[in-house]
Image (tube, helix red, strand yellow):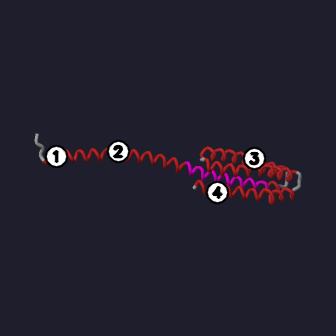
Amino acid sequence: MRMTIKTKLAGTFTVILLMLAVMVYFAITSLAASNASLNQLVTKNAQQVLLAGDLKQAMLDADSLILLHVAARDAADMTAVETEIEAKRIFITETIQKIRNLSDAEALQLLDQAEALRAEILPLREEAIRLSRLNSKSRAKEISAKEIEPLREEMVKSFNVLDARLD
């Protein structure tokens, strides 16, 4: 059977269209998969950055609350500040766990460093609160300024590194 030029051109054009359709299908499925991966990556990193910022702010707030406790005039004010401090501690613990759930090994190591510093700060905060309750306000301020502050600054630095790592 003899094919005319018209038939040959139509057949070639059909084959080219089929190849193009197959390529478009693979391109679209690959793009959909990469889009899903990118969305997950962006969402996860954005969540981590927001949580790390919230955590850093909460830890700074906790130190400010210690100074408010020292400045409190009566037991009722002290109790109110202690309630706020406890709420911050709970928030900090929950936020650390959320960050842990989203983090990779390198971020976990940075988080462990910050938590180690927090573990050093917590007993000092407790001691400052205890001294404040006993009306030894000058000693409580001294603990806050000379012992807690350097550890807090080091902890903030480690959170800055964590923030930079997550960006």
The residue type indicated by label 1 comes to Lys
The disc at residue 25 is 2
Element at label 1: helix
Of helix, strand and loop, which mostly describes the magenta segment?
helix
Q: Check disc 4: other Cα within 10 Å, few if <14, some if 14-19, many if 20+.
A: some
Q: Earlier in the sequence, mark 3 or mark 2?
A: 2
Callout in the foreground (2, 1): 1
Query: How far is the residue under mark 3 from the one under mark 1?
Result: 82 Å
The residue type indicated by label 4 comes to Val
Query: How far is the residue under mark 3 from the one under mark 2?
Result: 56 Å
Asked where in the image residue 53 lies, by quadrant, the reply is: bottom right
Q: Earlier in the sequence, mark 4 or mark 3?
A: 3
Measured from the top left, where is residue 27 in percent x and y?
37, 47
Callout in the foreground (3, 2): 2
Label 1 sits on residue? 8
Element at label 2: helix
Measured from the top left, where is residue 132 in percent x and y?
85, 53
Q: Earlier in the sequence, mark 1 or mark 4?
A: 1
The residue type indicated by label 3 comes to Glu
The disc at residue 17 is none
Label 4 sits on residue? 161
Q: Check disc 3: other Cα within 10 Å, few if <14, some if 14-19, many if 20+.
A: few
Query: How far is the residue under mark 1 from the one under mark 4?
Result: 66 Å
The reply to whether residue 80 is in sight is no
Q: Earlier in the sequence, mark 2 or mark 1?
A: 1
Q: Is residue 115 a member of the stretch shown in magenta? A: no
Label 3 sits on residue? 86
Find the magenta span and give its range.
44-66
For this view, does 65 lie left or right of residue 13?
Answer: right
Query: How far is the residue under mark 2 from the one under mark 1?
Result: 26 Å
